[in-house]
Amino acid sequence: MTNSKLMLALGFALALATPLVARADPPGDPAPVKQDEQGMWVDKNGDPTYKLEADGTVDWNTFSGFRRYNAACIVCHGPDGAGSSYAPALANSLKTMNYAEFFGTVVGGRKDLMNGNDLVMPAFGDNKNVMCYLNDIYVYLRARSTGVVGRGRPDKHAPKSPAFAAAEDKCMGPG
Amino acid sequence: MRKLLLASCFGAAALFTAGYAAANDELAKMAADGKQWVMPAGDFANTRYSQLKQINAENVHKIAPAWTFSTGVLRGHEGAPLVIGDVMYLQAPFPNTVFALDLNNDGKILWKYEPKQDPNVIPVMCCDTVNRGLSFADGKIFLHQADTTLVALDAKTGAVVWSVKDGDPSKGETGTDAPHVFKDKVYIGVSGGEFGVRGWMSAYNIKDGKLAWRAYSEGPDSDLLVDPEKTTALGKPIGKDSSLKTWQGDQWKIGGGDTWGWYSYDPELNLIYYGSGNPSTWNPSQRPGDNKWSMTIWARDADTGMAKWVYQMTPHDEWDYDGVNEMILTDQKIDGKDRKLLTHFDRNGFGYTLDRTDGELLVAQKFDPKVNWATGINMDKASADYGKPIRVAAMSTEKEDVNHKGICPAALGSKDEQPAAYSPETELFYVPTNHVCMDYEPFKVSYTAGQPFVGATLSMYPPAGDSNMGNFIAWDGKTGKIVWSDPEQFSVWSGALATAGGVVFYGTLEGYLKAVDAKTGKELYKFKTPSGIIGNVMTYEHGGRQYVAILSGVGGWAGIGLAAGLTKPTEGLGAVGGYAALSNYTALGGTLTVFALPSD
């Protein structure tokens, strides 16, 4: 994602910080309608989405999301968004959770405190490994939620675009 | 026999008034006859062996649940209870409730302690909110809370005697290990290898909770508590700045090497033994060097913390093969000579036997034949690579953004924290193991304090051609050979217990408590408890009856990787059973189940 987009999204998420209790609209039709300047596909609402080619090749963002999910999210949410004994299966959650709600939850965290089964998700807002790839992680999980991407590593993926690489380097910073 | 009589003279009342200075002798005496279970592993040597033999290979098939107890907590339940006199002490995962149960009154709750902890510690625990147990000495019960608070509770009342904060959870530093009491000190380590936490070992005075010493796994010599001339590695002095030289710049400050395993103690040598974990991050190309002293067996003076010797098993880790697993201390003959041995089953798939007096490497062999990241350990004392793994280039994960395939074992290792047992009668180790391989793709990662610092994606699956993801094995530590091996559908994530009755016990992830013949591995009994087992089996005697107790309550790392089943790396392996989800077999819930022979 571009830095400007990241800043925009952050501002958006902060504005959303509290009113996340009520269920928002589901994510809607995932059909890709166009690509942004870095090659990421968006749906008719302008939300990030996946694109699967006829030969099974997934877009770069979906693949990048798979990788980053497996570093930052898997320790609680389990392999392939399939859930663990203590955090929900995101492949299921994203059937009803839209982009804005997803964004707000990742940035700000979430707590469900229940006797003996406290569920706590940390705020990832200052974690570059998550924030620089948040759209990718969303796209990957969206593809998991519709079943378009199965379990495990996607076999074939589109290459990383130079624009994506440049934005990634800028976002992650040196070292 | 004299020892046994002596020990049984000590009633529970006498124990509570025993002086702290004598805590060591006291605990050794209490543990001697096996009637009580006074420390996490049953003894200082970490053998998890009990003298009790009322339950034996002939009659174990008759045992049945005598009583049960729910902890009221749903997360993963590791560890085991203690039994001191007529009271059982039991801990739960976060919020780390401690119960004192009256064995004279059907487990009635004598007292309950529930610390108030900030729930923000929950998501910085990498692999569930587990807690591995309690320790006892000087009339106090010691608990290492998730938020790194070490608390001493009055064993009679549950009142807090003293409390001390050992680390900072906002930086990802958490407590999961059982405190261990040796001499007049209580020892705790730290968890957080996936958060860039630089590991340490802390020793606190039993009496007042004052910090006696703290020794880090990485950094300058003064932090390590080493003597460059006297501390040795494989017989040679480690030299000045032994850790700093093996890191790029300041990377050691976020270098991992955490210490969340089980510790052991040799009273004669006055040395404590433990292992340090993986270097952070999981992307090896980001941290060039041997990354000392991660992945290391440590032998330290119990009084001062000064390191006597070290041995790094996996220099420059590329697979998350933590070295934290327990060190089991035995006295055995090798080549006709009495040796003081230390045996360790490492995550990297090798079973190591060392001389624990000086750290001489005697045996290093694979305890799972499918281990393929190294062909062996270099045993040639003349070689510059003596003691190092002989790596297979194809299994290296050094290249960023490349998916490295077919590495065995997986990151959870051929064995994780689930502790093994040792029987001095059979001279065999009983080892719960994982039988899982992986694909590993590292990529660039950035460090933020208190946030995951991982940098790799993994897929895990059973070895090609196998459908079982675990084995329960008997191991000869003198020769480095598997004597027998019982396949299990899932990883065996429960600690084992060996007994003088010729029976070995362990639990399975589906929830079975199993009893097998110590000589042959033949299954003699099984019972399905309410949830999957990641706790450790223990035994005690009360009112003339032997009991065997196990905590069930699935979770931990097993609850991450296996709850949803492992992924299929390729089509057509045909091992359908092996990929099945653990959630098809068991659900959450912490319960203690206590078994005994029928009373009539």
Image (spheres, coloured by chain):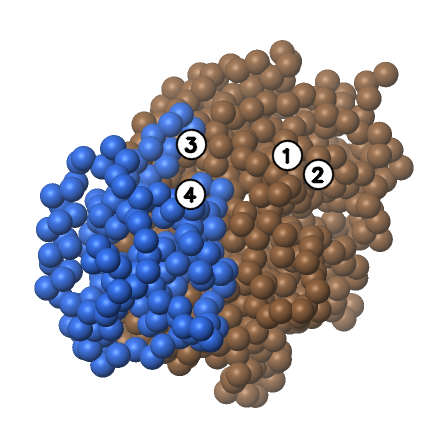
Chain colours: A blue, B brown
Neighbourhood count class around disc 1 (C-alpha, 10 Å): few under 14, some 14–19, many 20 upward: many
Query: Chain under label 1?
Result: B
Query: Looking at the image, is mark 1 or mark 3 nearer the viewer?
Result: 3
Query: Chain under label 3?
Result: A
Front-most of B441 and A19?
A19
Asked whether the viewer can see residue B179, the reply is no
Q: Quadrant of the C terminus of chain B?
A: top right
Q: Which residue is mark 2?
A: B513
Asked if residue B54 lies left or right of residue B403, the reply is right
Marks 4 and 2 in Cβ contact (< 8 Å): no
Evaluate whether label 1 is on the same chain as label 3.
Answer: no
| B52 is higher (above) or lower (below) than B65 | below
Front-most of A131 and B176?
A131
Looking at the image, which residue sits at the far top?
B105
* Real-space CA distance between mark 4 and mark 2, rounded to the nearest whole angstrom: 28 Å
Callout 1: helix, strand or loop? strand
Q: Which residue is mark 1?
A: B550
Asked if residue B473 lies left or right of residue A167, the reply is right
Task: Name the kind of residue labelled 2 in the image.
Answer: Leu
- Identify the residue shown where x is 69% and y is 62%: B575
Neighbourhood count class around disc 4 (C-alpha, 10 Å): few under 14, some 14–19, many 20 upward: some
Task: Name the kind of residue labelled 1 in the image.
Answer: Ile
Q: Which residue is mark 3?
A: A117
